[in-house]
Image (cartoon, coloured by chain):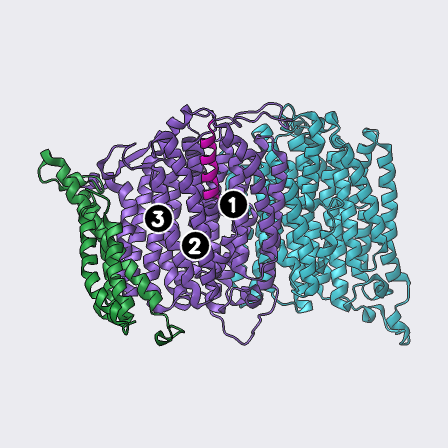
């Protein structure tokens, strides 16, 4: 029986939240909905842990949906890379049922709470589905499931701030445009190859010579996914969506949605296409690299001038996405490892940060930095969590953000790209500015309204926040798990590529006389 | 619009065939164009026509919003649940071969499976289309009907 | 009590940290809290002193904790230079802890618990820096030190404090992330290791023409060494209460900076590699310029703490210059300057604080004739000044002597000139304070007829806890003159190579 269960785990990963969602809506009571959400999220998390344990040694799980053999049927394909991403998504998802109740009580009308849980579970289904599937069109389906439920989730912040409605609509339009580009690209791929299974696509694409349709397909897929990732300059939906959505939604989305989209991009870049595809290499070097660097700087600079704390963090997320894209453009194992590690580290850090901000919004009633003055004294634990998360954003040692920065800069040096290395540290210093603005306001200024009694955050919210912030410290001090998982993931992605530093680029001028392949394991 | 006599009479004639046609489309999905999505929309079209002509309040009496909500959820549950039943019967998720009572006629399993899930799809699509209509139609109008 | 090396190192890190927690818990009872502060410092010093004895006997205490990332471990290994820094930091913490109690109470400062907690954390970080066995560990604790001293600089929480703290943090984090991190990762990628090895790890792994660039990244990245133009944080940090200045300018922060500079010079680059590649020639000139410019600016400052701050910038550049000379004698002189300068500067700052507690005066022009009413304070100030100037029989003479020797040894005659001119400038900005205090009439006294009472009734010193520590450290300056031989013996392996260890220990070679 247990063996049966283990066999079906890949399917159950998405089925459990998928079934839980309509159940929440069926019963209509928000308490029952919460219970169902709790059970489903925890079960999902356990499943992803088991799956990761099975594949971290390099094996691959293949589950045939509907009993149809791939490439005809839809295949759920789990290797070390997507198992790691599953862990991230379900991990954050497991914390939301603990965090959400107190937060949404003040931000969403009570009648909508059961819909909140329904939409949240659907979003979870979608995100997990994108991650777990090995069929390209299935990716699109689940991507849309998660996106549509996200639009609904964002719109639920309308009671607190009516701008949530316009933000959700804006997000809907842009997201749909992105999805359309993506599916058009998929369609072109299907025309060229006749298959939708990712592994099969990879084989067939290798056989194609320099093919314009293939290039167009690649470009469309890149643009479509780039919009979901909030790759500069297609990031315009993100700040408003994050700022006006309910805090619990922002915390969940910031930690998962863009990460899954980046996962999808990496999947397509490496598993479907590959580094042997020259158009991809050129695009990465000439398009994605400059855009990533622009994102890092432009977003950080804009963040400095924000008065709304949630928007500040949203722009910070755009900059962090820039870092993740930068890692890929180095075309080396260290670079891809850096991207994957930052996927995890940023998810944990940003999740914790937005949770802390949610607690501040709950007590102070406003996300504006002006209104949050003196929060350091009135809500010490919450602000301490924020500061800790901020330090991780900057990349101070002993935090997870430092590990990501280390790998990123190492990858830059290994590929002899010393200009990006300098740019990485320069943009980290910009992060110091916007984090420290908040720190000064919270600790070095008097409260805006001194007579108001502000209590500390509710215990459940505080604990969820500190679980994530604690994780960002833990994985900054002992990064063995994350580096191992990320390395394994990078290995899976890069396949048979040699372990040494760079793959394709010739060193233009060498800072290093001979590239030493040192054991990264 | 209930004071438009011709519309009322004609809709009384039209709505039953619409619903019937929807059922036809629903169950002939594996033989011809059709299936759950199209059928659900057509089925909903019948109800929406009723709502437009007779008023949303009438529609709401026929189809209480709570029922609509439940049907939407139920449809998804039917679809997903079919897959779960497959799993319980020892096959992979959504493997319709599980429903073949006789292994020699495996295609029968496919038929049963598809019919059930398409029914679930049709149910949900119908419920959601009607819900969307009811949501928009319930907004207070600024121009009275008599002014038209 | 039998101590293993590992336990001792772990204790050296944990004791101040535990002290911080206990201080936080005893927030309600200020006397208990202050006692815990002092006790922790005493406990720490006993551990470091024990370790010192071990190192002098030839042992190399080591503690390997765990790998943070593959190949990058948090590990500790005490070599003589680190031991020296550790002893200086922990020893002077005792003095500062006593002084802080007197000062904070005398000034009725707010937020004292937070103050002592951050103090303890900063000392813990200093221990981590002192004992680090690789650049990675050192960098971790270097950043912890910056962050833990930020609340100390911003302590008063007024607009000036905010501004000063902002400058402090932006320069220190800006340099450490902007330059030092790049240098460290470059080293890591080029050589595959970050361990401190005497003689350096770079030769053969780095294109020689890049060595000056890498050194520049390190030198500017070690912002705590206050090399110009990244020195502004030091005067900006003067907004902090004086015990913090004593800590920053004598004990923890600046010494951590120049200590790191020396470690990089000796254990990452290696003195031979530096002289071979000439990587540090430009640094020599920059340090020399820094010495002179800072001294000149010091002369223009009327605010006593600002003058002492610029004096510190100048003195720190002595050590950087010594390292940049790329000679063994330079390493010896620079390393020796760590305890000598520490002892002298802490005396000067504590005296400045004592003056503030007693009279609330901060500018030298207001302090005329104060020497007659505060003779002990001014006597200590005089001794500290003489040590900084480099006159025997005070400790500062020896370190300056070795740096001069190093300049002569490497043929850098201009540097000898720089050092001589700088000593004259030291006289010019330090001795007038003493002279004005003793010989000029006190403007406050002029309005009253001169009291004809005995000297003891005219002395209006600061409270005992504020005057005693600087007097102790002044005596320390004197004693260090005679202890210099011990320090020389301890540092010999660092400066002249590990082979010299057994030769100078005076015991049996095995």
Badge nearest the viewer, 1 or 2:
2
Chain B display color = green
Mark toward the start of the polypeptide (1 vs 3)? 3
Q: Secondary structure at mark 3?
A: helix
The stretch drawn in magenta includes residue A212: yes
Badge nearest the viewer, 2 or 3:
2
Alpha carbon separation for disc pair 1 and 3? 21 Å
Instruction: Tell me where residue C64 appears, x and y as whole percent.
Output: 51, 37
Q: Which residues are magenta?
A: A211-226
The stretch drawn in magenta includes residue C5: no
Which residue was labeled with disc 3? A126
Chain identifier for the purple-coloured part of the image: A
Chain identifier for the cyan-coloured part of the image: C
Chain under numbered label 1: A
Answer with the quarter of the image where residue C379 lies: bottom right
CB under 8 Å between callouts 2 and 3?
Answer: no
Alpha carbon separation for disc pair 1 and 2? 17 Å
Chain under numbered label 3: A
Q: Secondary structure at mark 2?
A: helix
Which residue was labeled with disc 1? A231
Instruction: Tell me where residue C360 appears, x and y as whole percent.
Output: 76, 68
Instruction: Tell me where residue C288 appears, x and y as whole percent.
Output: 81, 40
Q: Along the horizontal axis of the image, is C146 left or right of A110? A: right
Front residue of A342 and C279: A342
Which residue was labeled with disc 2? A172
Q: Along the horizontal axis of the image, is C95 left or right of A147? A: right
Quadrant that contains the C terminus of chain C: top right
Mark toward the start of the polypeptide (2 vs 3)? 3
Residue at 41 percent across and 65 percent down: it is: A458
Residue at 53 percent across and 28 percent down: it is: A501
């Amino acid at each position: 029986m247990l063996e049966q269960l283990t066999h079906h785990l890949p399917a159950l990963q998405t089925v459990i939240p998928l079934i839980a969602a309509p159940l929440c809506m069926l019963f209509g009571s928000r308490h029952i909905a919460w219970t169902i959400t709790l059970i489903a999220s925890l079960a999902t998390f356990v499943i992803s842990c088991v799956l990761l344990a099975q594949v971290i040694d390099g094996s691959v799980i293949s589950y045939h949906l509907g009993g149809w053999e791939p490439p005809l049927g839809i295949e759920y394909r789990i290797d070390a890379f997507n198992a790691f991403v599953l862990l991230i998504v379900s991990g954050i998802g497991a914390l939301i049922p603990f965090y959400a109740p107190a937060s949404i009580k003040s931000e969403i009308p009570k009648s909508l709470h059961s819909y909140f849980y329904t939409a949240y579970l659907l979003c979870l289904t979608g995100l997990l589905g994108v991650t777990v599937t090995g069929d390209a069109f299935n990716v699109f389906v689940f991507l849309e499931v998660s996106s549509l439920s996200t639009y609904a989730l964002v719109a639920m912040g309308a009671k607190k701030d009516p701008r949530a409605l316009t933000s959700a609509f804006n997000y809907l339009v842009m997201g749909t445009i992105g999805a359309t580009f993506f599916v058009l690209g998929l369609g072109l791929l299907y025309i060229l190859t006749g298959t939708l299974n990712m592994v099969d696509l990879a084989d067939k694409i290798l056989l194609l010579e320099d093919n314009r349709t293939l290039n167009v397909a690649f470009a469309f897929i890149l643009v479509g996914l780039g919009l979901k990732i909030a790759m500069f300059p297609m990031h315009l939906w993100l700040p408003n969506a994050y700022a006006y959505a309910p805090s619990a939604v922002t915390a969940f989305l910031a930690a998962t949605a863009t990460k899954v989209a980046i996962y999808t991009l990496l999947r397509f870049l490496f598993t479907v296409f590959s580094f042997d595809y020259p158009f991809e290499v050129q695009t990465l070097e000439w398009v994605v690299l400059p855009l990533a660097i622009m994102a890092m700087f432009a977003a950080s600079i804009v963040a400095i001038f924000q008065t709304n704390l949630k928007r500040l963090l949203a722009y910070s997320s755009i900059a962090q996405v820039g870092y993740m894209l930068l890692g890929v453009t180095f075309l080396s194992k260290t670079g891809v490892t850096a991207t994957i590690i930052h996927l995890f580290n940023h998810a944990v850090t940003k999740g914790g940060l937005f949770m802390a901000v949610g607690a501040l919004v709950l007590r102070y009633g406003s996300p504006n930095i002006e209104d949050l003055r003196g929060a350091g004294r009135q809500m010490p634990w919450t602000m301490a969590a924020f500061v800790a998360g901020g330090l991780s954003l900057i990349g101070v040692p002993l935090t997870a953000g430092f590990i990501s920065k280390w790998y990123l800069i190492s990858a830059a040096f290994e590929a002899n790209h010393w200009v990006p290395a300098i740019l990485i540290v320069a943009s980290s210093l910009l992060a110091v500015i916007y984090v420290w603005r908040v720190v000064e306001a919270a600790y070095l200024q008097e409260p805006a309204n001194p007579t108001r009694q502000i209590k500390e955050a509710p215990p459940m919210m505080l604990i969820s926040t500190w679980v994530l912030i604690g994780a960002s410290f833990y994985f900054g001090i002992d990064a063995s798990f994350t580096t191992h998982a990320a390395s394994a993931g990078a290995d899976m992605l890069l396949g048979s590529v040699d372990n040494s530093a760079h793959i394709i680029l010739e060193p233009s001028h060498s800072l290093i006389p001979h590239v030493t392949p040192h054991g990264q394991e | 619009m209930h004071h438009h006599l011709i519309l009322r009479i004609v809709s009384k004639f039209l709505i039953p065939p619409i619903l019937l046609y929807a059922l036809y489309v629903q169950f002939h999905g594996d033989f011809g164009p059709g299936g759950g999505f199209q059928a659900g929309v057509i089925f909903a079209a019948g109800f929406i026509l009723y709502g437009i002509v007779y008023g949303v309040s009438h529609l709401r009496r026929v189809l209480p919003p709570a029922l609509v909500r439940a049907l939407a959820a139920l449809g998804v549950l039917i679809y997903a649940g079919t897959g779960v039943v497959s799993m319980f019967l020892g096959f992979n998720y959504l493997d319709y071969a599980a429903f073949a009572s006789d292994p020699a006629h495996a295609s029968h399993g496919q038929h049963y499976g598809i019919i059930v899930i398409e029914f679930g799809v049709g149910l949900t699509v119908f419920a959601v289309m009607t819900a969307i209509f009811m949501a928009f139609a319930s907004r207070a109008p600024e121009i009275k009907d008599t002014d038209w | 009590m039998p101590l293993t090396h590992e336990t001792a190192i772990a204790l050296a890190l944990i004791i101040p940290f535990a002290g911080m927690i206990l201080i936080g818990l005893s927030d309600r009872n200020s006397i208990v809290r202050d006692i815990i502060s002092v006790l922790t410092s005493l406990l720490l010093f006993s551990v470091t002193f024990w370790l010192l004895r071990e190192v002098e006997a030839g042992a190399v205490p080591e503690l390997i904790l765990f790998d943070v990332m593959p190949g990058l471990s948090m590990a500790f290994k005490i070599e003589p230079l680190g031991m020296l820094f550790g002893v200086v930091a922990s020893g002077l913490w005792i003095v500062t802890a006593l002084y802080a109690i007197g000062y904070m109470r005398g000034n009725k400062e707010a937020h004292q618990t937070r103050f002592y907690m951050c103090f303890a954390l900063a000392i813990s970080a200093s221990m981590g820096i002192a004992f680090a066995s690789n650049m990675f560990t050192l960098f971790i604790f270097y950043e912890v030190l910056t962050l833990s001293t930020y609340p100390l600089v911003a302590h008063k929480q007024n607009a000036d404090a905010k501004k000063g703290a902002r400058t402090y943090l932006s320069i220190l984090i800006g340099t450490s992330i902007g330059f030092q991190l790049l240098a460290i990762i470059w080293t890591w990628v080029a050589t595959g290791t970050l361990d401190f090895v005497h003689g350096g790890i770079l030769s053969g792994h780095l294109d020689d023409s890049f060595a000056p660039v890498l050194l520049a990244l390190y030198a500017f990245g070690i912002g705590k060494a206050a090399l110009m133009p990244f020195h502004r944080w030091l005067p900006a940090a003067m907004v902090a209460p004086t015990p913090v200045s004593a800590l920053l300018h004598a004990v923890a922060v600046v010494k951590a900076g120049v200590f790191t500079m020396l470690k990089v010079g000796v254990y990452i680059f290696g003195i031979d590699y530096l002289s071979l590649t000439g990587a540090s020639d430009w640094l020599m000139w920059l340090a020399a310029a820094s010495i002179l410019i800072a001294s000149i600016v010091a002369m223009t400052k009327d605010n006593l703490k600002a003058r002492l701050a610029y004096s510190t910038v100048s003195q720190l550049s002595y050590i950087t210059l010594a390292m940049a000379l790329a000679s063994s004698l330079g390493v010896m002189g620079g390393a020796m300057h760590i305890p000598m300068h520490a002892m002298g500067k802490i005396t000067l700052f504590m005296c400045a604080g004592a003056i503030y507690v007693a009279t609330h005066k901060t500018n030298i022009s207001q302090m005329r004739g104060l020497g007659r009413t505060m003779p002990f304070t001014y006597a200590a100030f005089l001794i500290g000044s003489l040590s900084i100037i480099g006159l025997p029989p005070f400790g500062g003479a020896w370190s300056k002597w070795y740096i001069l020797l190093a300049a002569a040894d490497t043929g850098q005659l201009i540097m000898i000139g720089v050092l001589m001119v700088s000593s004259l400038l030291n006289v010019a900005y330090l001795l007038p304070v003493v002279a004005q205090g003793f010989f000029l009439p006190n403007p406050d006294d002029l309005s009253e007829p001169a009291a004809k009472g005995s000297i003891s009734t005219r002395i209006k010193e600061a409270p005992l806890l504020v005057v005693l520590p600087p007097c102790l450290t002044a005596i320390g300056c004197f004693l260090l003159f005679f202890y210099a031989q011990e320090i020389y013996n301890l540092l010999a392996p660092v400066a002249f190579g590990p082979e010299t260890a057994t030769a100078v220990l005076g015991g049996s070679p095995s």
